[in-house]
Image: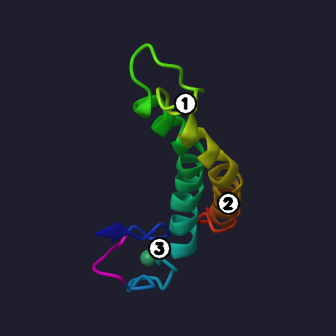
Amino acid sequence: MKKCSKCGAESVGEERFCANCGADVSVNRFGVVGKWLSGGGCLLALSPIAIALLATPIGGNMFSTAGDGGGAALFLLLFSLPVGLVVSVVGLVLWLSNRSKK
Ligand SMILES: [Zn+2]
């Protein structure tokens, strides 16, 4: 149940326009998708760091690739950082350009 921002009438379901005053009450999907993309992009960009941390035994060297550390996961950063950043920026632009206007 959402409320019309213009007249306050409650609308049921997924109508695009308020039944009372005709104002646009649709949820902006691009804005929602953009929000998720920007958050997901950040997570994707930084996830190898978390993997490296988790894969490193206590006392081990996180930056070692010799098998006693999670250093191999850090190589994923070469791939995930640019991809994650691009996804995040695209999502941010989508989000900001589709925020509900007040
Ligand atoms: Zn209304």
Ligand 1: which quarter?
bottom left
Residue 96, given in percent of the width and then of the height, sits at 67, 60
Its colouring scheme is rainbow
Which quadrant: the C terminus? bottom right
Q: Earlier in the sequence, mark 3 or mark 1?
A: 3
Mark-to-mark CA distance, 2 and 3: 14 Å
Q: Which residue is mark 3?
A: 27
Disc 1 C-beta below 8 A from ligand 1: no
Tell me if residue 61 comes above or below residue 69 in the rendering.
Answer: above
Question: Within the magenta stretch, is there residue 48?
Answer: no
Q: Nearer the viewer, mark 3 or mark 1?
A: 1
Q: Nearer the viewer, mark 2 or mark 1?
A: 1
**CB atoms of marks 3 and 1 within 8 Å:** no
Mark-to-mark CA distance, 2 and 1: 44 Å
Q: Earlier in the sequence, mark 2 or mark 1?
A: 1
SS under mark 3: loop
* Residues in magenta, as a range: 9-14
In the foreground, 60 or 88: 60
Residue 89, given in percent of the width and then of the height, sits at 70, 57
Under mark 1, the amino acid is Ala
Quadrant location of residue 64? Answer: top right
Q: Which residue is mark 1?
A: 66
In the foreground, 65 or 18: 65
Q: Which residue is mark 2?
A: 96
Mark-to-mark CA distance, 3 and 1: 51 Å
In the foreground, 25 or 49: 49
Q: Earlier in the sequence, mark 2 or mark 3?
A: 3
Q: Residue at 69% of width from left, 49% of height from top?
A: 78
The crowding category of the residue bearing disc 2, from other C-alpha atoms within 10 Å (few below 14, some 14 to 19, many at least 20), is few
Of helix, strand and loop, which mostly describes the magenta segment? loop
Under mark 2, the amino acid is Leu
